[in-house]
Image: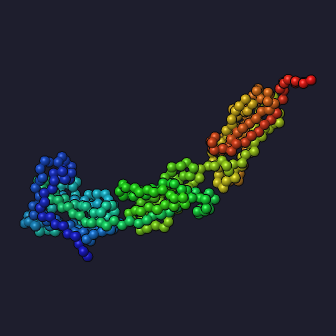
Amino acid sequence: MSTRLFRLGALAVSAALTGLLLGGAAAAEPVATVPNLDVTATFDRESYRTADVYKLTVTIRNTGAEPLTGLVVVVNTPENGWGGIEPFAAEFANSGPGGTLAAGETRRAEFFGNAYVGTRINTSVTALQRPANKATVLRFTAPVTEVRGTVSGRVFADRNFNGAFDDGEAVAGRTVLANPTYGSTAAQTTTDADGRFSLDLLIIEHWIQVVNDSPLITFEGQEVEVSETGNPELAFLGELAPDSSTLDVEMSFTQSTYAPGAEASLHAVVTNQDRRPATGVQAFCEGGSFYLGAVEWRSRDVTIAPGGTFTFVGTATVPGTAVSEGEVRAKCGFGFDRQNSTWAYASASVPGGTGALHVTP
């Protein structure tokens, strides 16, 4: 197995790094190195590829004739693109008083990380001796070859609810995002006329999602995890917004004749012709000089099962102006809002109007 070896017998660490390790303010000058401490670090390979797991073997050795006491040894190992500080061993943790390395003693520990983000693995080993705060630091690196791959798929609206793509169901021009689990650089693209998309990504863990930038077709909760080992073509099935065109309405007055000022009653039978429930169906009416306007409907936010019906019942006062027309009318929509409704019409007679008869000799 090839190795990449780094050795440091005595290298001054910057005051800033020492201050971070101690949790205190940084000094103006570098501090002295730990005497008689030899530190080596060995990668298990000369280089890596994206998503490879690397092993780092760290060895510390006391080359002197006396024990080294108060030792704090920590290793900074990038894991999935993020730095992680780990103690060399429990007794060498920064949170304690420090461990002891006997004269001539050698200790070895292994650390693991992922070559997920970037073109190099950059890490370090820091050793500090208390109470003098003498420090030694070893920085080491290994190259990473970026490996990319293609993630592709299709975005469509399953209009016939068969769970498969059919002609006429493609959703074009929709943004597709790829958010990496580790790192902050997201990739994005736009679906073509056939609803297809393709993303060139690092072969690492991503979350693929379709952006909900249109209320007509939504993709809530459809994030798909893409692993570093490759995936089949992805499919995103959009949920169609409620469509009032699937509602059939038959509306009528319950009487054929009304007097001005009388209470008129409307019945509207709404049939859901869709293959999914119609949820949140309401009734809306438009008023006018001889139209019923302020109709009081007994029901609102109704759910109608696929193929089912529901009868809306409403009442309103016949306007006095209706007598001049000889009838009262109703114009009402049934749906999800005024713009997304099926409109129906009804009329009833309002007798009693007066007029003038002109006779031409």
In the displayed structure, does residue 292 sit left or right of residue 148?
right
> Picture quarter containing residue 2?
bottom left
Judging depth in this view, the residue of 333 and 124 nearest the camera is 333
| Residue at the image point whose x is 52% and y is 53% from the top | 220
| Left or right relative to 15: residue 343 | right
Residue 235: give x, y in percent of width and height: 52, 62
The answer to whether residue 315 is above or below residue 90 is: above
Q: Is residue 69 visible?
A: no
Q: Position of residue 287 (x, y in %)?
A: 70, 33
Picture quarter with the C terminus: top right
Q: Is residue 17 above or below residue 348?
A: below
Residue at (41% x, 57% y) in the render:
187
Q: Looking at the picture, how far across and down is residue 103, in whole percent? A: 10, 66
Relative placement, left or right, of 153 versus 248 is left
Residue at figure coordinates x 19%, y 59% from the top left: 126
- Image quarter of the N terminus: bottom left
When asked about the image quadrant of residue 200, the answer is: bottom left
Res 271 visible: yes
